[in-house]
Amino acid sequence: MIPFSRTLALLFSGLALVLLLSCCRKNAPQQVPETSSAAKVAQTSLVAPAPNTVIKIGDSVRIELASLRNDLHIDSVSVRSGKQTRTFTGGSLQRFYWSSQDHRVGQTILQVTVYYNDSLRDTHSASMVILSDLVPKKQNYRIINKYPHDSHAYTQGLIYDNGVLYESTGLEGQSSLRIVEISTGKPIKMVSLAPQYFGEGIAFYKDQVYQVTYRSQVGFVYDKRTLQQIRSFDYQIKEGWGLTTDGQNLIMTDGSAVLYFIEPEFYTQVDKVEVFDHKGMVTSLNEIEFARGKVLANVYGESYIVIIDPLTGKVTGKIDLEALMPEGSKGDYSKVLNGIAWNKENGHLYVTGKNWPVLYEIELVPSL
C-alpha cells in the first residue's frame, strides 16, 4: 500500500506537470498548415468581350486587356474556344481581334491567357453565343408514293434497308422493334421490349441494330436479320430520343439542341455539337437520319424537318411537311411528325409520324 502522504505528493506533481504543459502549448507559436503558394493576384483584366456576347459565324470579336501595373510587358496572348487555340504575338496585345470563322455554332467560352514578364500569366474567360451565318434554305419535295402504315405504331425510329423498313415504336408496354413490308405496312418480324422500357431511336452499325430507350438509360443491340437481342448497354445521357450513324460513330439526340457523338463498341460519348440557326438554338431534336453528310432531324411537335451540318451545328435547310399532316393532328402530340428513313440508292426519303395511317415516299428537289 502507498502511504497517503506520498499519494498526495504524486497527485500534486501530476497536476503541476499538466499545468506546465498547458502553458507551454499556449505560449508556443501556432503551426499554420503549409500551402503550395499564396493566392496569385491578377495583373491584367479582360475589358472585352462583354459576358454573353452574341455574334454570328465569321464575325470578329475584339479582345481588350487592361494592365494593372505600369511595368507590365505582355509577351503573348492565347485565345482558346472549344478545341481551337490561337496564339497572338507582336504588335499591340492589349487590343486585337479574334475571328470566329470556321468555328462551331452554339454556346462557348473564350479562355484568354495572358503571358507577361517572361514567366507569369493570367487567365480570363468570357461566355459567348455564336449563331449560324446561314438562313436555312427551304427544301422543296414531291410525293413519289403513299403506303399504308400501322396507325397504332407510336413511331420513334425508322431505317430503310434493302427494300424494307426497320421501325422502332414507343410507350411502356407497347414498345417494339420490327421489320416492316413497305407496300403493306405490316411487320415481317417483330420483337417486343420488356414493359418497363419505352423504345426510341434506332440505327444500324455493322449489321446490328442499336436501339435506345426514353428514360431508362439502357439500350439494346439486335441481330439485323433475326432481331434476336445480342446484348444491352448503359449510357449516361438522361434521355434517349433519336439515333443514327455517320458510319463511324452513332449520333444521338435527347430532346435538347445537342447532337451527341457516341463510340458504338462501349457507347461512350466522344463529342457533341449544339444546333443553331441564324436566330438561335434549335431545340427538341427528335428522330434523326444521316444522309449525304447531313443530319436530318424532326423537331418534336413541329411539322418540318431541319437539315444540319454535323461538323458545325448549323441548320442549312428546312423541309416543310405541313401538307402531309393527317387531318385533325395539329396540336395532337400523339400524332406528331416522327420517322425519317433515307434510301441511299435513289435519294428518296420515307416519312411518317406517330400513329399515322400513311407512310410517304418523297423526293427532295433539288436532292441533298
Image (cartoon, rainbow, N blue to C red):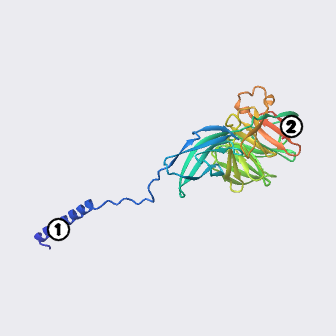
Q: Secondary structure at mark 2?
A: loop
Can I make out residue 155 in this image?
Answer: no
Residue nearer the viewer, 269 or 191: 269
Q: Quadrant of residue 46?
A: top right
Q: Secondary structure at mark 1?
A: helix
Q: Which residue is mark 2?
A: 366
Quarter of the image containing the C terminus?
top right
Disc marking residue 13: 1
Q: Position of residue 224 (x, y in %)?
A: 80, 52
Residue nearer the viewer, 100 or 104: 100
Q: Residue furthest bottom?
A: 1
Residue nearer the viewer, 196 or 120: 120
Residue beneath the point at 78% across and 26% down: 327
Q: Position of residue 176 (x, y in %)?
A: 74, 44
Q: Position of residue 297 (x, y in %)?
A: 75, 39
| Earlier residue among tags 2 and 1 | 1
Residue beneath the point at 87% across and 33% down: 142
